[in-house]
Image (spheres, grey):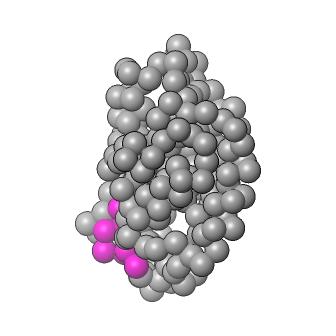
Amino acid sequence: MKLTLVRHTTLDIAPHICYGQSDVDVSANFDNERLALQRKLGDTQFDAIYTSPLRRCQQLARALCHHNDFGFTADDILHDHRLKELNFGDWEMQAWDAIPRDMFDVWANDYANLAPPNGETFSQLHARAKDFVDEVAKDAQNQHLLVITHGGFIRALIAEVLQMPLKRLFRLSISHASVTLLEFKDDVPKVHFMNL
């Protein structure tokens, strides 16, 4: 099974805001970013399209179905809550520098195992990413799936494929409207490319 993972486009939000699972709208540059993304995807054919239920991903999934010759309509898009970004709990929609520094530092030193207040850990995000792959792989062993999701989810799956510690996730740069291709075949999953 191949997964083409696409991070959503840029957002209509001030810089340096923690937005996680908040349902933020796309920026005014959406159409330009979508066009650039379509060029990256080229004429790749997919067997199914999945999206995070958050608006920024749903809008991109619908636009790609409308403007590309995937053979899908908006009704074919499969929404899956496991594709959401990390839940930052009480920190959602706060400026990063407004979060008490001592609290942030404790979290940042062990975000794999510690959650923001009322949020989730990266280990929990990793577990739901792995659960998604395990479930879809049962029915899509030889298929190529397009997945519109978030930076944290993409990092979690790359960490799974490379068996890298979750505490090093932020060493991976995942740009808006970027494309990452993973393959899950037999016992040796592969990263074909990332952050294209």
Please state if 128 lies on the left or on the right of 32 as rendered.
Answer: left
What residue is rendered at 72% in x and 43% in y?
Answer: 42
What residue is rendered at 57% in x and 40% in y?
Answer: 70
What residue is rendered at 60% in x and 53% in y?
Answer: 67
Residue projecting furthest to the left? 118
What residue is rendered at 32% in x and 50% in y?
Answer: 81
Q: Which region of the structure is painted magenta?
A: 86-93
Residue 64 seen in this snapshot: yes
Could you tell me residue 76's position as x and y percent? 40, 42
Q: Quadrant of residue 100?
A: bottom left
Q: Is residue 90 magenta?
A: yes
Could you tell me residue 40's position as x and y percent? 72, 48
Q: Is residue 84 magenta?
A: no
Q: Nearer the viewer, residue 52 or 116?
A: 52
- Marks counted in the figure total 0
Which secondary structure is most common in the magenta stretch?
loop
Could you tell me residue 145's position as x and y percent? 51, 34
Could you tell me residue 43's position as x and y percent? 69, 38
Q: Nearer the viewer, residue 96 or 41?
A: 41
**Please, is residue 101 above or below residue 78 in the view?**
below
Please state if 106 lies on the left or on the right of 174 as rendered.
Answer: left
Q: Nearer the viewer, residue 160 or 70?
A: 70
**Please, is residue 126 above or below residue 9 in the view?**
above
Residue 168 seen in this snapshot: no
**Please, is residue 7 above or below residue 80 in the view?**
below
**Please, is residue 26 above or below residue 121 in the view?**
below
